[in-house]
Image (cartoon, grey):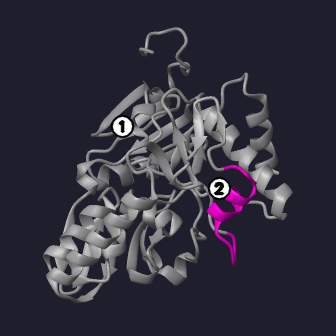
Amino acid sequence: MERNDPGVPRFANGLEKKLPPVRGRLTPNAPLGHMTWFGVGGPAEVLFKPADKQDLIDFIKNCPREIEVTVLGVASNLIIRDGGIPGVVIRMGKEFSEIKASVYHIEAGAAALDLNVALVARKNAIAGLEFLSGIPGSIGGALRMNAGAYGCETKDVLVTAEVLFHDGTVRHMTSPEMGMRYRHNDLPASVIFLAATLKGSAGDGAAIEGRMADIKTKRAETQPIKSKTGGSTFANPEGAKAWQLIDGAGSRGLKIGGAEMSQMHANFMLNTGNATAADLERLGEEVRQRVYAKSKIMLEWEIRRVGIPLATDKDILNWMKRERS
């Protein structure tokens, strides 16, 4: 559907007039679905693309507190609900994607792709960051959810993260200070990650390249990486594997509308071509209930869900209310 199609959700105009002046770009009713790996979702009430770090800091410092702010990374592990995202959505561009290498360290902006960080580390013979090549996201997202793969997590290699707070202050914080643990940190949702310094060790370029090649092969053999997916749908419960629980509950290949749990990897959700965000979320909730009925374990979403459903999606509205209570 085109933006002027009456079927496309739209917010009332006017929010941009309440926002502080910026040097970047403010776009009302900006479509977002095409930015996500699932390819679904409604618009941003206002999309803000900051010109640089100072532009972002000034905006956060002066933005009225009652206006909701959401940061959008590469949206590889994200469902944007069909009604869109109210308030301001911040999309950090190439100005936040610089990557620098020094002696066994990498400095990377929040918008830098995890794969690109791993490639720069390989080029500079810095070992220990190969796992990032298996994570389809950005450094900001890796910090937010302590992303990990192949036996290593972001917290294991983090020196400091540059963090912007809602009052405009910027702090450099360590993993313990942020309370990083499995797929989580203790910082409020309102903070914005600007950059990170990661540590590695002296390595051999050929050996590093070999480990990255192994990771690429394993991903291709076990994950539906050529499909519209969001990576792991649910976090692994302590002492268990989410995919095994899903499989044991008979949910491998389960479909709702255009959404399907992958036949290749039971913990991967797919948009088979015409799914809505509501299809995906309903499928996830159905899987959670089936797993709970079978094993008495309630899976926790690893995929982040943001925004509001359409007014007709009463069940999703009810789930949101229960999560907030």
Q: Which residue is mark 1?
A: 21
Q: Position of residue 77 (x, y in %)?
A: 49, 51
Q: Position of residue 303 (x, y in %)?
A: 57, 52
| In the depicted structure, whether residue 229 falls above or below residue 11 | below
Quadrant in the rendering for residue 169: bottom left
Q: In percent of the image, x 48 and y 44: which residue is there?
A: 63
For residue 322, side relative to residue 254 (left or right): right
Q: Is residue 228 visible?
A: yes
Q: Dot 1, how many residues are within 10 Å of its Cα: few (below 14), some (14-19), or many (20+)?
A: some
Q: Which residues are magenta?
A: 237-251
For residue 208, side relative to residue 287 (left or right): left
Q: Position of residue 204 (x, y in %)?
A: 17, 87
Question: What separation in Å lies between label 2 and label 1 (alpha carbons)?
Answer: 37 Å
- Residue 242 lies within the magenta run: yes
Q: Position of residue 37 (x, y in %)?
A: 43, 42
| In the depicted structure, whether residue 193 falls above or below residue 71 | below
How many dots with numbers? 2
**Considering the image in quadrants, where does the N terminus appear?**
top left
Which one is closest to the eye, mark 2 or mark 1?
2
Kind of residue at badge 2: Trp
Q: Which residue is mark 2?
A: 301
Kind of residue at badge 1: Pro
Q: In percent of the image, x 59 and y 62: which residue is there?
A: 188
- The secondary element bearing badge 2 is classed as loop
- Residue 292 lies within the magenta run: no
